[in-house]
Image (cartoon, coloured by chain):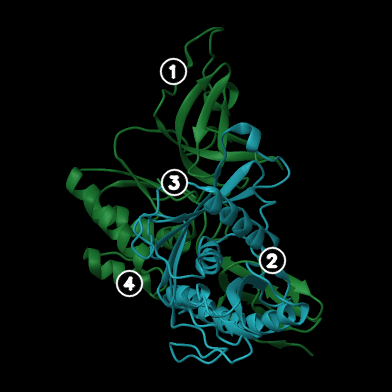
Amino acid sequence: MKTQVNIMSKYQRTDGRDADGIRPMEAKVGVIPQADGSAMFKIGNTIAYAAVYGPRELYPRFLQNPETGILRCNYNMMPFSGAGDRVRPGANRRSKEISMVTENALRPVIDLHDCPNAVVDVFIELPQTDAGSRCAGITAAAMALADAGIAMRDMVSAIAVGRIGDGSYVDLSYEEEALEDYPVADIPMAFVNRTGEVTLLQMDGEVQTEGIMDALAKGREACKRIHALQTQALKNKFQGDTQ
Amino acid sequence: MGEQLLANKAIAVPGEEIARGMDFVPAAGTYRDKESILAARLGLVSTDNRLIKLIPLSGRYLPKRGDMIIGQVIDVQLSGWRIELNSAYTALLSMKEGTSEYIEKGADLRKYFDLGDWIGTKIINVTTQRLVDVSMRGPGLHKLSGGRIIKVNPSKVPRIIGKQGSMIGMIKNATNTKVVVGQNGVIWVSGKPGDEIRVLDVIRKIERESHKSGLTDVIKTYLGAPDAVGDGNYEQMDDQNEDTGEHHE
């Protein structure tokens, strides 16, 4: 029989992070030489690779837009990426939705008016996942798009903030997301760095208005740190070109 | 008085503030938001007085009028040839621009340029919808028979050509090959098989070390070349600007 924990009791993070703590991050640009642009972003045990191809010709033709080029994202978890249960390969309802929200999160910053009828393809692959995979995917894709020389007015960074009990905890791991003793809400979000526009905001769970506002504020702070890492990774790849 | 926040030749990341102040003017690859000049892509900061632009470090080729490029015939149509440009768009080489010969009505156009042929050609027009017209009229424009094709990133092309064609002239002299560099990042090399491989090796080296200053001298030593500066044997196809269309034979 499960013991009922008083939901008002303060949740303590098992991995010793404080509420604002992000899991250890790592970012690298140019990991896939064959692609026009690529990046790897690692946050805790979640690893995302993004490869950008294009602008290139778009077929079938009915998808072409004579006004502007289009952005096409594909999010995919590798079959062995989860906690040991095999993920069935190929698109599913979840991955289609995430591909779509990733596209929507990135589209506001990129400008493809210079390449009408063309497409920029972004492939996001996750060899290992431990919660926060759509955010890791968006963060990696933004770096890969910049690496590919796509016209972008700003960078996008993404993070998930969880509500456990009535506190906000940045960047939940899968263990925390699946806590049974507390009510948990997971809120993935993405921000345009300079302007602070929100380009992704989803939620899984129940939360009060104040809870959302608090989570957004914490997410914004975390994205500042992620953005600094993205900038550094991009500069590192091209550093040689400065002399 | 404004202030420049990123030095000349620094790398700017999309959205990064390059300069602040109304006395700066945003040019290619940058935009203004209130007081600030921001990067609209990833690139190298380049300032010309108050003008701030970004030089691309990566990216696909976008067809530009006047560029000398190398393309491949991918289709033969009713009144011309469809040319692949190593870009998101293909070009049309019309019968009139393809050859000065008189072409009989109903003649087989594959006699002139066959499927799969590589050609050195010039872009004569690009529309807003990126419909591209190319022409074979002009000095040095012809079919590229034999040899081999090397593809590089278009942003490296100015380094491979060098100032006034110094780099490419030296490579051709030292390896005794014919080399044509297209602005779209396609390079055609023809010579003895061993020499072609040497050119390929040198071009990959330039690609890797394109950031170094004094690269021509590095490559000169690498090749063991006797003569570093242009051999006067190349044709300057375009205007003075080293960054614009150049085509070397």
**At which x and y percent is residue A24?**
44, 83
Counting from the top left corner in percent of width and height, residue B112 is at 44, 20
Mark 3 closeness class: few <14, some 14–19, many ≥20 residues within 10 Å: few
Does mark 3 fall on the same chain as mark 2? yes
Residue type at mark 1: give it: Arg
Q: Which of marks 2 and 4 is in front?
A: 2
Q: Mark 1 lies on which chain?
A: B
- Quote the CA–CA distance across marks 1 and 3: 43 Å
Q: Nearer the viewer, residue A44 or A226?
A: A44
- Given this view, does label 1 or label 4 mark the residue nearer the observer? 1
Q: Which chain is cyan?
A: A
CB-based contact (under 8 Å), mark 1 and mark 4: no
Please tell me whether mark 1 sits on a helix, a strand or a loop.
helix
Same chain for the residues under marks 1 and 4 in the image: yes
Give me the residue at 56% from left, 84% from top. A225
Kindly identify the residue that appears in the image at 52 percent across and 50 percent down: A54
Residue behind mark 4: B217
Residue B84's place in the image compared with B176, above or below, is above
Colour assignment, chain B: green
Report the amino acid beneath label 4.
Asp
Residue A90: mark in rendering: 3
Q: Position of residue A55 (x, y in %)?
A: 56, 49
* B81 is higher (above) or lower (below) than B161: above
Q: Mark 1 points at which residue?
A: B110
The residue sitting at 50% across, 32% down in the picture is B83
